[in-house]
Image: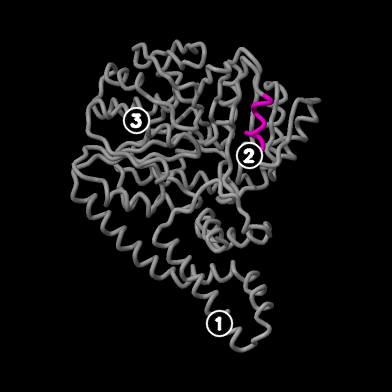
Amino acid sequence: MIIANLIYILQSENYLPKRFLGYVYKHLAWWRLQKRQKIVWTKKATLIYALTIILFLGILVVGVWLTRWWAVIMVLFLMILLPWLALLALIIVSPIDYWLKQRIFGKAKKIIGQKKVIKIGITGSYGKTSAKEILAGMLSEKYKVLKTPENINTEIGVAQFIIDKLKDEEILIVEMGAYKKGEIKSICQIVAPDYSILTGINEAHLERFGSLENTIQAKFELPVATKKISYLNFDDARVADNYKNFKINQAVGVESNKLISEVKIKPDFQGLEFKLFGVEMDCRLLAEHNLSLIALAGQLAKELGLTAEEIKRAVVKIEYAPHRLQPIRNSQIDVWVIDDSYNANLAGVMSGIEVLNRAKGRKIVLTPGPLVELGDKMKEIHKQIGELYAQKVDLVLLIKSKETEAVLEALKGQGFINYKIYNSTSEAHGDLKNILQKGDTILFQNDWPDVYF
């Protein structure tokens, strides 16, 4: 179990040695990790796990043979060194991992090259998954569509997905994620996208990218690699202000207010009504920022031959993305839950609060601190969010984390006293039966993986 926890942390940190060691030596009780998520037992993870055990036992056996009664001290010493043994196992496995990956990449490229399939890439600091689901729904009205699942957006994940799943589909939609420059470019070398969508750029994962400029460079790798048309969200200033700095084959800027009109918010979290391409449409999605994504997808769908009526049929069928402003009503106690636990960017936080403010009763937020990986912007942005809570929310329930203090400081600075602090997510959820009252609406805002606690 102890070594499995190490592999879990290593995997959660994307097998990056510096981040892995930074975590385990800042959290000296890492072996008691609560495992809010689970290890994905890939061949790589399994091999590192087995090799770490072999290294541990090998050193222990040799140590006991040489030192005999010093064995107890040897075990304690090895426990301290366990993270380094896991790292050594990673280094040993790396050449094999690289060779296997290259084989997979080559096979995926060959399959893509043999198929007559329209390839579409989607990236951005936010809205990737929602845009993918919206676009797939639209294009499915006319074409046979294959899209990457929610948790697959890396080079190896996309390549293996293509090998396993791409058959006779007419359209392939690939969500592309990145933590550093070059990763999206690598995915594009496999997929060779014909069309693309860039949803927006913000401070998400700023700590990993190093700077906002690096984030901009990374996200524009997709439009640059797009063979035909790239649709860019011009509602986002960072996209609109920077696209001319890149060599893009054909860039189409999309401004939602030029395509969408007569927006109406339906009562009781029932969604939105609006006109797109002059046609009245009905959508279950709650946040108005989804209109930018619908406009982007709509433009691309029209390019691929869909009519406004076909798009309308698709829009009304769009389901909530799980854990992304997903409304759930408990009719027994008359409480609304807005599950936004997978949204982890400032635009999403603000949209979540805007949706919460449509509630008729008490407005409550439950959060460990909405955002992660903001680097030196972390305190500043969490203070901004705390001030927003103080102005818009009736009760704030904070789960203790590294960023709780910044939110708390902002609440106190605004003279806000209606907050409660919990030591863990389970403790907070366990107390909800004592907190919630008839007519309340509670927003679950972000749910951090273990490595952020």
In this picture, residue 443 sits left or right of residue 47? right
Q: Secondary structure at mark 1?
A: helix
In the displayed orientation, state which residue is furthest to the bottom.
Answer: 66
From the viewer's perspective, is residue 192 above or below residue 433? Answer: below
Q: Position of residue 9 (x, y in %)?
A: 55, 56
Per the image, the residue denoted by label 3 is: 135
Amino acid type of disc 1?
Val
The residue lying toward the viewer, choosing from 287 and 402, is: 402
Q: Is residue 366 magenta?
A: no
Q: Are marks 2 and 1 in contact (CB under 8 Å)?
A: no
Tell which circle, 3 or 1, labels the residue nearer the N-terminal end.
1
Span colored in magenta = 427-435
The Cα–Cα distance between marks 3 and 1, rounded to whole angstroms, is 58 Å
How packed mark 1 is, by other alpha carbons closer than 10 Å (few <14, some 14-19, many 20 or more), is some
Tell which circle, 3 or 2, labels the residue nearer the N-terminal end.
3
Q: Position of residue 357 (x, y in %)?
A: 61, 18
Amino acid type of disc 2?
Thr
Check residue 61 in the rendering and tell me which mark sits there, or answer none.
1
Q: Nearer the viewer, mark 3 or mark 2?
A: 2
The Cα–Cα distance between marks 3 and 2, rounded to whole angstroms, is 34 Å
